[in-house]
């Protein structure tokens, strides 16, 4: 999914740092709470969603801790001319661009490019985004030459001591009491820690040769589903589309997304119905929206929807954000 261009090309040169805490009970509402990012979240696990975001904005950096209560598929894009590092305290069950994250790895993506995250239920992650000219200038002052592996590979190995030190700094900044902070001091400390982290020499484990083919199979299905939004898609049609067997199709999805093709199709349609209900006009009904998205058995749809999101579709429609 192309998320479009970012809304910020340069950071504000001078503004008061602020700490912001936001809570949400809808996955997309939570996704939109992160400043300057462009995101869309699909809920994968069943139950009522809860998300919390603790964020501190500095002049040329963004620091946050994100908690998400349900398993998600996330389409993300960081603001341009920036670098994002994602540090989950527990990596199990998380994937970036279909690659499973190891216990001694962090996520790493340049701004202005789409990427995909799969995160498990009850997931926490620390995030640090830095303006690239600021990072480059700090490296030059210290005589450090940074490699550019982070532009190609979404995972990066980090020593445990360095990882613990960075997590400690982020936690102390985010969990402090509200009030004025010495912005330049905090920014300089974080930059020093970030430069040490980015100097890691040990390469991340390379994905197996079959990864590229499996990823392309999944991406081709995603593109097809995006182009055929309203109608159901059969497994036979997907096999013909991707020129692979059912077994290969199944393995591609479970290894890249952690769910089967049928689960992906069902959850994608349910999440799109939820977005449509939250954005509906006063004249639209649950029946109209559900049938548009191919749910013809309305009783079963209502049961599936409530199981997935923890509320009836009529409640979502009536409680939508104005």
Image: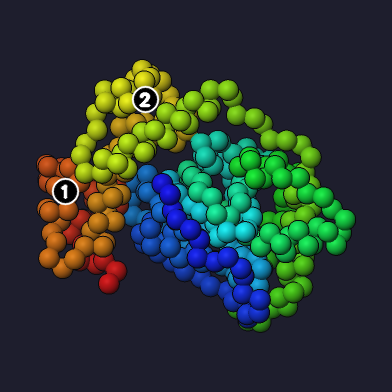
Q: Which mark is residue 151?
A: none
Of callouts 2 and 1, which one flags the residue occurring earlier in the amino acid sequence? 2
Indicate left or right for 252 with 56 as reference.
Answer: left
The answer to which image quadrant residue 242 occupies is top left
Label 2 Cα crowd, 10 Å radius (few <14 / some 14-19 / many 20+): some
Compared to residue 39, the image places residue 294 above or below, namely: above
Image coordinates for residue 30, horizontal then vertical, percent: 42, 61
Which quadrant, please, contains the C terminus?
Answer: bottom left
Residue 155 visible in the picture:
no
Indicate left or right for 163 with 252 as reference.
Answer: right
Image coordinates for residue 154, horizontal then vertical, percent: 61, 42
Q: Which residue is mark 1?
A: 292
Asked if the residue at tag 1 contacts the one at tag 2, i.e. Cβ–Cβ closer than 8 Å, the answer is no
Q: Secondary structure at mark 2?
A: helix
Label 1 Cα crowd, 10 Å radius (few <14 / some 14-19 / many 20+): some
Compared to residue 81, the image places residue 266 above or below, namely: above
Q: Which mark is residue 242?
A: 2
Query: Which of 132 and 59 lies nearest the eye of the viewer?
Result: 132
């Amino acid at each position: 999914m192309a998320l479009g261009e970012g809304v910020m090309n340069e950071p504000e040169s001078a503004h008061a740092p602020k700490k912001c805490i936001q809570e949400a009970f809808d996955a997309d509402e939570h996704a939109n709470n992160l400043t300057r990012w462009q995101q869309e979240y699909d809920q994968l696990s069943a139950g009522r969603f809860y998300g919390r975001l603790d964020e501190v904005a500095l002049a040329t950096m963004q620091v946050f801790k994100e908690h998400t209560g349900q398993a998600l598929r996330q389409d993300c894009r960081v603001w341009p001319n920036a670098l994002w590092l994602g540090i989950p305290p527990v990596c199990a069950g998380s994937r970036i661009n279909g690659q499973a994250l190891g216990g001694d790895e962090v996520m790493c993506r340049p701004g202005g490019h789409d990427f995909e995250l799969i995160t498990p239920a009850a997931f926490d992650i620390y995030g640090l985004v830095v303006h690239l000219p600021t990072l480059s200038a700090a490296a030059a002052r210290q005589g450090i030459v940074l490699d550019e592996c982070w532009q190609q590979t979404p995972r990066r190995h980090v020593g445990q001591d360095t990882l613990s030190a960075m997590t400690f700094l982020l936690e102390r900044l985010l969990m402090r009491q509200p009030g004025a902070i010495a912005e330049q001091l905090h920014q300089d400390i974080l930059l020093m820690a970030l430069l040490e982290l980015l100097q890691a020499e040990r390469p991340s484990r390379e994905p197996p040769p079959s990864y590229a083919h499996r990823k392309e199979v999944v991406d081709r299905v995603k593109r097809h589903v995006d182009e055929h939004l309203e109608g159901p898609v059969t497994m036979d049609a997907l096999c013909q589309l991707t020129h692979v067997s059912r077994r290969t199709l199944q393995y591609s999805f479970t290894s890249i997304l952690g769910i089967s093709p049928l689960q992906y199709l069902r959850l994608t349609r349910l999440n799109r119905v939820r977005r449509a209900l939250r954005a509906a006009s006063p004249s639209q009904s649950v029946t109209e929206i559900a049938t548009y998205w191919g749910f013809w058995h309305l009783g079963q749809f209502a049961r599936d929807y409530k199981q997935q999101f923890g509320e009836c579709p009529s409640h979502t429609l009536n409680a939508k954000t104005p």
